[in-house]
Amino acid sequence: MELQCKIAVNATKESIWPYYADSDNRPIWEEDLENIVFEGEIKTGTMGRMKLKNMPEMPFVLTEVIENASYCDMTDVPGVGQLFFGHKILQVNGVTYIQHSVRLEKDELTEEELSFLSGVFADVPCSMLKIKQAVEK
């Protein structure tokens, strides 16, 4: 199952991109992020670790990185499964959008897993608004 949100942003793709690719900018929109470390360049296949407040450190892998367009990663959540996060910068008819998604890779979700996924997604719209506000200043 995948949950996603898309909003228009009055900014260029190039001005939005650093909010995904530069770890110094991540706390601006990911308030619960305590630390993020990449084990190499920001590119598809690179692994890393992140620490969120009140959570253990989690490894992740970048599953798709296209400069100024797409930053996607995956983390294995013990007892739950593979959790995919998508961050895309889109241009449609001259309008720039950011689109974030959270997907749990399972054929069928239990009620508990759906609740978990919904909880993970809950702060996504607010995070997106923080990016919008930062780049539109």
Image: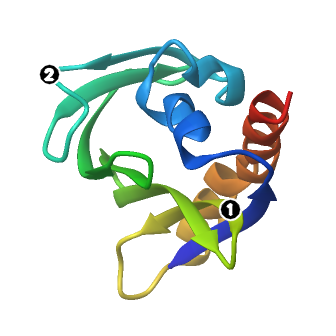
Q: Amino acid at mark 1?
A: Tyr
- Compared to residue 11, the image places residue 1 above or below, namely below
Q: How is the image coloured?
A: rainbow
Q: Is residue 54 visible?
A: no
* Camera-side residue of 77 and 41: 41
In terms of sequence position, does the residue under pointer 2 or pointer 1 come before the other?
2
Q: Please, what secondary structure does the residue beneath circle 2 have?
A: loop
- Compared to residue 72, the image places residue 57 above or below, namely above
Residue 1 horizontal/vertical position (percent): 50, 79
The residue lying furthest to the front in this view is: 94
- Compared to residue 137, the image places residue 128 above or below, namely below
Q: Please, what secondary structure does the residue beneath circle 1 have?
A: strand
**Residue lying at 74% horizontally and 33% vertically, measured from the top left:** 135
The residue lying furthest to the bottom in this view is: 107
Eye-nearest disc, 2 or 1: 1
Q: Residues within 10 Å of mark 2 (few under 14, many from 20)?
A: few
Q: Is residue 104 visible?
A: yes
Residue 24 horizontal/vertical position (percent): 51, 12
Q: Which residue is disc 1 drawn over?
A: 97
* Camera-side residue of 68 and 94: 94
Q: Quadrant of the C terminus?
A: top right
* Camera-side residue of 48 and 71: 71
**C-alpha gap between disc 2 and disc 1:** 28 Å
Residue 126 horizontal/vertical position (percent): 82, 44
Q: Amino acid at mark 2?
A: Gly
The answer to whether 80 appears left or right of 91 in the picture is left
Q: Residues within 10 Å of mark 1 (few under 14, many from 20)?
A: many
Q: Which residue is disc 2 drawn over?
A: 40
